[in-house]
Image: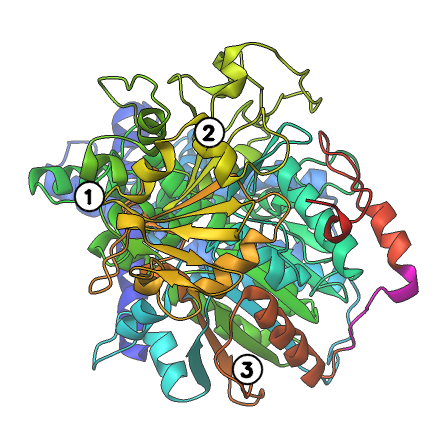
Amino acid sequence: MPRWKSLSGTLFRVLAVWLVSSLTLLVLAALLPDFRLQSAGGDSLTRTAFTAALGAGAFGLLSALVWPLLVRALLLVPALVIGLLVFFLNGSLLLLALGLIPEGRGQAAPETAVIVAAVMSATSSAASGFLAVRNDEAYHRRLVRLAGRRRSRRSVAARGPATPGTVFLQLDGLGHDLLCEAVRGDRPLMKTVARWTGDSHRLTPWRTDWSSQTGASQLALLHGSNEDLPAFRWYEKETRTLVVSNRPTSAAELQRRAIERTGDGGLLAYDGASRGNLFSGGADQVALVMSVAARRGKHNRSRAGYFAYFSDPANATRTAVSFVAEVVREVVQSLRTRFRRELPRVARGGLYPVIRAFATVVERDVVVAAVIGDMVAGRTAVYADLVGYDEVAHHSGPAHRDALQVLRSLDRVIALIARAARHAPRPYRIVLLSDHGQSHGPTFLDRYGLSLGDLVRAGCGLPVPRRAGRTPSGAEAREAARAALGRPEEADGPHSEMTDGQHPAMTDGPHPEKTDGQHPEKTEGPASSHPLVLASGNLGLVSFPDVPGRITREELDRRHPALLGTLANHPGIGFVLVRSAAHGPVVLGPSGAEHHLDTGHVTGTDPLAPFGAGAAEAVRRTDRFPHTADLMVNSACDPATGAVHAFEEQIGSHGGLGGAQSHPFLLWPVELTPPAPDDGPLTGAEQVHRVLRRWLGEAEGPQLPLGPGADELRREVPPAEGFPSPDPAPQDKPR
């Protein structure tokens, strides 16, 4: 910050606190009979106000100059005695300040002076804290001091290790193309990232798997594998369980399966910290991590970051004021989009303003404070997820001005972390990356007047309700807020539809999940043959719970002969994946178009062509997963604009193929080796994980592969409640 700007900001805060203190004196003089600011004959209001200003200024100067000396002189006095003396000393300072007012206009009884001084101190402190809410420099100094005290308690060596540490900052949902726009021009939106891109860092895109969402990407980034993770939410027939990636029990089970599959603890297994993520990455230090939020006992530290952060009253004040401001900002922005009749738009009422403020303010502030503490403590590797942009972009649109404001605030956060690195006992390399992008477009329901569940109903020959019900947004911050408050998981998936128009918990069919973690008993009756429809952005999953394994195309044509044609020929559907007993996996498109994945044979126009290079391989990989749904439905995509149609209430969505959602970014320091392999760009989060591991090795920070000790780690990560232990291993299970 320029020196003149810092000085002017300080002067403004001093004058503002002085004004508040003066007004406080005037109010107290009017309320307390033994306290006056006028001469015996009375004074004008102007003269009285001037006297109050003199008294407040004198008290402020004495508090700033004399109080530190008094505290130092009383260091040897017992704490209880100091607590009792504080009020007396404050009152004495006020009496001294009133004595400095000319002509004896300031007078107070000793006992009244104690009360006035206490109220003055409280109001001036509150005013000072309020004005410091948007002051990043003051916030930075406070966080570094707090982290430094914790570091001293850990007895870390003053100089620390000579090898550099690494901080991975995930900007959730920010695509490569949008980042390029945000750092372009003479006045870029993200000034810090723009400076890095042109100087100390290099930028490259990478391509996600078919499931372009946080659960699939982050599990692979931190644990090296996202095998058998077909979407954000899916139904597992053998256990009759609905798996939702951002629920604590599901996240714990997915992490356990990844460790079982790879035999490795994760990216952060050696002296690492995981902050604000779905998964721990094997880190010993965790805060706001979903995969450990469901645990009980001494190992559950998922919410410890909240308590550590809010134990500082200044932090609590800053975050509370910013939280309220963010709620008001969301209400105003939502009303503005309605008044301007901007399209597309989704409902933004209910609890959404509070959830947005939680993601963009509370979770951000706690994560940033934890990261700064990790750096000052000298940890080897830190991975943190900042989810604010993704949350706002779901409801406003990826390139909407409301979402771009969040990017500007995230740039300030990145600058704050970079400045804090100067106080760390070791140098730090900061790597920025995203887990996926976001694609824009009106929802499937808004565009065509019916939901994917309604379309499946029509294809099955079942009645379609006259009024389609809207599904709430599946943004990740909702479950994070529930975990922060210690609320139990929801009993059923908010994005599942039964074809009779009821929620799974309200039908006679199979119940996907129970809150006590026990598998529901099998049910009989006609509802058990109804398909279960789930949505993950613009990716839809259709399962037939009464059919063991994946239903074949031939069996589906026998049961519901019109279903596949209804889906494949709908203008809002890009393609449908189904398994054929005769031809293996087949991708169906409009007008009888087919793409046989095993042979590569295409009939008619290739339905995967609008989704770019690599689409066929991404779909082929997902088809091999044991828990891929009976039908995988991807919405249509406009190749010119990248617009898609989400099957849930999101105008900025991700989860399938199409548009910017499949192209996140990686921004790394130039001293690290380039990430791209010789045979082409980075493809899949598992490949990015190998790059991140290599960078940790280049920093000479030893990693801790499990090897022979894998069994011990598996014992430390028990199966999540409600999930069976996999036996045999997932890759060995018969389909």
Q: Which residues are magenta?
A: 702-709
Viewer-closest of 613 and 388: 613
Q: Secondary structure at mark 3?
A: loop
- Asked if the magenta segment contains residue 159, the reply would be no
Q: How is the image coloured?
A: rainbow
Q: Measured from the top left, where is residue 720 in percent x and y?
A: 73, 36
Q: Secondary structure at mark 2?
A: helix
Q: Earlier in the sequence, mark 1 or mark 3?
A: 1
Looking at numbered disc 1 in the image, what kind of residue is underneath it? Gln
Residue at numbered disc 3: 675
Q: Secondary structure at mark 1?
A: helix
Please identify, in this view, whether the residue under mark 2 or under mark 3 is nearer the observer: 2
Mark 2 Cα shell of 10 Å, populated few (<14), some (14-19), many (≥20): few
Q: Measured from the top left, where is residue 673 in percent x and y?
A: 58, 88
630 sits left or right of 641 in the view = right
Q: Measured from the top left, where is residue 243 in percent x and y?
A: 59, 36
Q: Earlier in the sequence, mark 2 or mark 1?
A: 1
- Asked if the magenta segment contains residue 706, the reply would be yes
Q: Which mark is residue 333?
A: 1
Residue at numbered disc 2: 558
Q: Residue at x 25, y 75 (%)?
A: 188
Q: Residue at x 31, y 42 (%)?
A: 650
Viewer-closest of 341 and 166: 341
Establish if 284 lies above or below 94: below
